[in-house]
Image: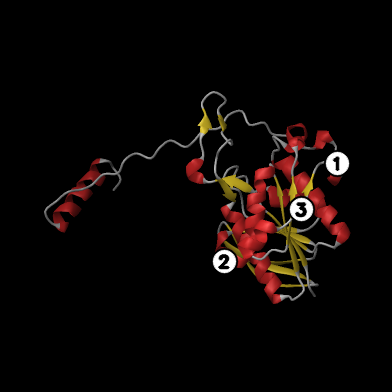
Amino acid sequence: MPLNIVVCVKDTPESLSIQVDPATRRVRHEGVKTAINPFDEYAVEEALRIKEKLPGTTTTVVSVGPPEAEGALREALSRGVESAVLVSGPEFAGSDTFATSKALAAAVRKLDLSQPVHLVLFGKSSNDGNSGIVGAQVAAWLKWPSAVSVKKVESVSDQGVTVTRMLEDGVDTLKLGLPACVSTVKEINEPRLPSLKGKLAAKKAAIPRWGAADLGLAAADAGSAGSLARIMSESLPPPRPGGMRVEGATPAEKAAKLVAILVERKLI
């Protein structure tokens, strides 16, 4: 049976371009180069692989963010996803995971009205917020079964989806009835690169924008007004200290010096 798959993606700052405003102690977004969240690439790839196995399967990417988030959606389109939707508007500014997941769930419901959605895929987390809980939150809003840290989709059919997920001390395999939400990890696959034809098609693709009113959300349910968490300040991790080069005329001399240093620092 062909499926209708939705992939939720995020447009995030490229790691090397992240800066914190010393006055506001918040991450600067103006003029920062962004791209599709790296972990979401694995979710997109898995949707495409399922589509290849089940002819007739359709795929859609959805993102909540500013107009610039179209870039992440077009990247997914260039790889083979058929359609995209951007949930955007000033009312969504300042969203935490609670408000973001509520908006994503509302978008899935809207898509489900025109064509039943069977599976919603997510990356394990974003490289900026790194909460790793949006997939489970969307499932809670939809009241659908979910699995996180999924490293392999074993099988998928109209009977359900069977997945293997990573645990702290091993793995387990479980079967979810459809519709369901699945959050993937990078071990699940190797994302493909877009083709030139795909890039050209994605550049021309029309991407509808949905605001809170389109999703049936009140202003109080979106953005900072609908959020439960407040970010007090943000900061970059401290720079790593410089490394140490152990000099010596021979490998044996270098090894002896290294051992002496480790003993002195009580590391061995």
Residue 173 visible somewhere in the drawing: no
Work out whether residue 20 or residue 180 is closer to the camera in this orientation and state it. Answer: 20
User: Is 19 displayed left or right of 211 in the figure?
Assistant: left
Residue pointed to by mark 2: 192
Quote the CA–CA distance across marks 1 and 2: 36 Å
Residue pointed to by mark 1: 213
User: Considering only order in the chain, which callout, 1 or 3, is on the residue closer to the N terminus?
Assistant: 3
- Quadrant placement of the N terminus: bottom right
Circles 1 and 2 in contact, beta carbons < 8 Å = no
The residue under the point 84% across, 53% down is: 109
Residue pointed to by mark 3: 139
User: Is 61 displayed left or right of 15 in the figure?
Assistant: right
Q: Position of residue 190 (x, y in %)?
A: 55, 66
The residue under the point 57% across, 66% down is: 192
User: For the image shown, how many numbered marks are present on the structure?
Assistant: 3
Q: Three-letter amino acid code at disc 3? A: Ala
**Element type at marker 2?**
loop
Quote the CA–CA distance across marks 3 and 1: 22 Å
Q: Three-letter amino acid code at disc 1? A: Ala
Q: How many neighbours does mark 2 have within 10 angstroms: few (below 14), some (14-19), or many (20 or more)?
A: few
- Residue closest to the far top: 23
